[in-house]
Image (cartoon, grey):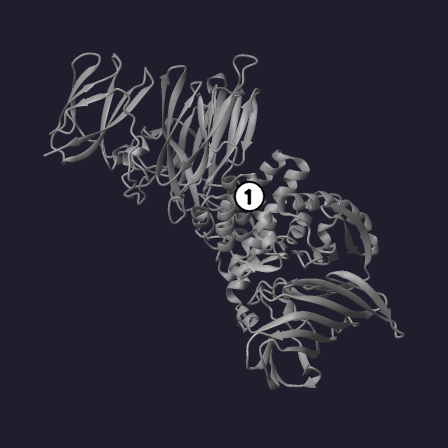
Amino acid sequence: MKINFKGFFFIVIVISFFFQQQAFSSSALRSDTLDIRKTTIHFTALDFISKQTSAFCLLDVKVKMNGVTELVFDLEGLIVDSAKVNTISQTFTHTSPALKIQLSAPMQMNDSAIVEIFYHGIPIADATWGGFYFMGNYGFQMGVGFNAQPHSFGRTWHPCFDNFVERSSYEFYITTTDSHKAICNGLFIDSIIHGNNTITWHWKLDENIPSYLSSVAISNYVMVNQTLTGNNGNTPAEIACQPTQTAQVNGSFAHLQESFTMLENRFGTYSWPKVGYTLVPFNAGAMEHATNIHIGNQFINGTLAYETLVAHELSHHWWGDLVTCSTAGDMWLNEGFASYSELLHQEYTYGSDAYQTALRDNHFSVISNAHIDDDGYRAVANIDSLYTYGPTVYLKGASVIHSLRSYLGDAAFFGGATAFLNANKFKEINSSQLRDYFTNYSGKDMTPFFNDWIFSPGFTNFCIDSTTVTPTGNGFDVSVFIRQRKHKSNDYYEQVPLEIGFYQNMQTKQMVTFNVSGRCTQLKTTLSFNPQMILIDPEYKLTDAITEDWKTVNSIGITNMNYAKCRLHVKSIPNAGDSALVRIEHHWVAADRFKNSANANGYVLHDSRYWHVDGIDLNKIEGWLQFPYNKGPVNHYLDSTWLKNTEDSLQLFWRSDTRSEWLALNDSIVAGNLNDGLGNVYYKQIVAGDYCLGIKRSNYIDPMNTDAPNGPCNLVNNLQSAYALIHDDVKILPNPNHGSFQIELPLEAKEWHFELFDLNGRSIKFNYQKRNLKLYSLAINDVVPGLYVLKISNTALNRFYTHKISITQ
């Protein structure tokens, strides 16, 4: 199912919050006592004005336990006239939606019976989405109800076990006037023409489906037929529409073959007898009834504007129809994979760039809006039933599946997904089963991924804390300290395959993937070149709490960096033919606070975001950076909790790296009304580093703390068991001692600099004296005995060392 989120989702949430339909006994536990093997529906719909229907349903059941004295089915909003078991009338009660049939004699394990239920009335629709609709010349079913509890909604037109677990085959006999045609699941068998201007349409689906995937649509339909080429030869595609819509159908379904081929290539051979779509007057999305997808008329307009909707619904014949989530809490298995299949359609049809654009658009929407629309940060699995059909399930589901693909690699991801679907055909599934299957298939333990990305709310965020580059032989030893921060997540992510890009210039780069865990990880590699730029995840393998934009600048002008939520103004390129690469990241986490609160001068840094600017050859261009702010809904309320004061107290701050203090910039602020929370801050240079907005507040104590204090983050990684320290040939003697050390350095140089930190990152005062260009003495007094970290640097030589020292009593 695909929802038209625009202008609709807020209504769903508001109504769902206040409207609680009483849950009833549609528990999957009933499927442990009774199996519905086949459902045969005889349904008559002749009068679309009165909307009255009459029907009877035959349920072929098999008992799975001894001593069954009552059969309980679900039928909502209709009136039951009689019930029979093996042609014998039975006593029943029907308190909608529970239909209870009392058996005249108990049934025992493996007993079979044909249950006949006769009923009539006006089928109901859900308050906001789903159920049975009569609209003008149409009558049709949409198989889920947003406000319904449970959401499965087959019970609005036939008796069933209305859950995600019970499956049966279906046969349909739908009687209409002779000006209408009925379209149902499966294959068309025949039509029976009666002498009273009515026709009975006969359809049959041998494959087993849950009740919510059963369907009927009635109108004056004609068929547009296509033939799809696939793994098993040809598969018929039947698209039911009004006679005037055939041209629109041909235009909007022009890439159906591409979707079909992509899905078979990615997830295995199609398992159904046909592909079917039926157009209905429904403007809030579509519904994936097996082999008979109901899709809104407005989405089939002759263009390819909604081709991803077509792909989304078709993909459910793998994720949602072939295998079905066992509970609504695992709906991401249906809808997340279907939403991700929209991106795969873009990739297959238009190429990898189109995939990347669709992916980044999707994730930007997730990190901007999902927590607003879903009233908080939520995990994609085990989601509350009020938010089953929200953007966390659909859009964040797609985002985390992209990350899952990156964790596993294409071969293990698509191979494992195909094998999983084949192993669980026509069954219900849950998230833990998928986790365990991928673990066994790939040989990688997927528990950390599912714990972090699937079972927990929020996101992770990575940034480069600091780097060191040391010439060695014909190459360069590079260390990169990676910080991890939490964006509404419960904990730091573990065993993340993080790709780092090392750039020699705009054309030459080397990608290295490291396994990252916890607050800080030191990564080491050797390169053949001295990198000009080092980036995290430059090819967008992970969907974390960063959105970014790139720009190769070779001309003047303004670039909207929409993902980075800023603008780049290039006013001149002094030397003709020069160019520069600019990358700006928008980090959706609070910036580090001031290292020394005295340096804040009364300013409070932003509590939700900051920017990081990087690039190659930035000195070859001139211009300025524009950072907009807006505390209203257009900016997803991102500035609302921080921007409390009048805007004349705003200030832009900058630092070169995490080891540096924030500095107030000589910026320009352009605002209209100084109290409307809307404006821009300009910095009239394009310089690499971190940028953050600050606002001055009198008598305010900033409640936020920096996630990792000064210096290379390994210095403060006291939560981890080991320290990754670079020694080279530095000699510190004696170690341990009472606080007096002799330091011999590997190179003679004038500008050696020393800093000392405790294991919480706090700077420690000490004295040192130069003996010669390689030899120094240090005196450390009045400190608690224990372990400390000494940082030694020489910026002229591009040398950086850390060493652990021990002070005893």
Q: Quadrant of residue 129?
A: bottom right
Residue 20 in the image: x percent, y percent?
52, 68
Of residues 541 and 67, the one drawn nearer to the viewer in this rendering: 67
Residue wearing tag 1: 413
Residue 694 at x, y percent in the picture? 37, 36
Relative to residue 753, is residue 563 depicted above or below? below
Residue 191 visible to an observer of this rendering: yes
Which quadrant of the structure image shows residue 119? bottom right
Instruction: Identify the residue shown where x is 47% and y is 53%.
Output: 379
Residue 494 lies, with reference to residue 49, above or below; the image says above
Amino acid type, mark 1: Phe
Q: Residue at x 64, y 57 (%)?
A: 321
Q: Is residue 373 above or below residue 97?
A: above
Residue 609 shows up from this direction? no
Across and down, in percent, residue 160 comes to 63, 71
| Label 1 crowd bin: few (<14), some (14–19), many (20+), radius 10 Å | many
Q: Give the SS element for disc 1.
A: helix
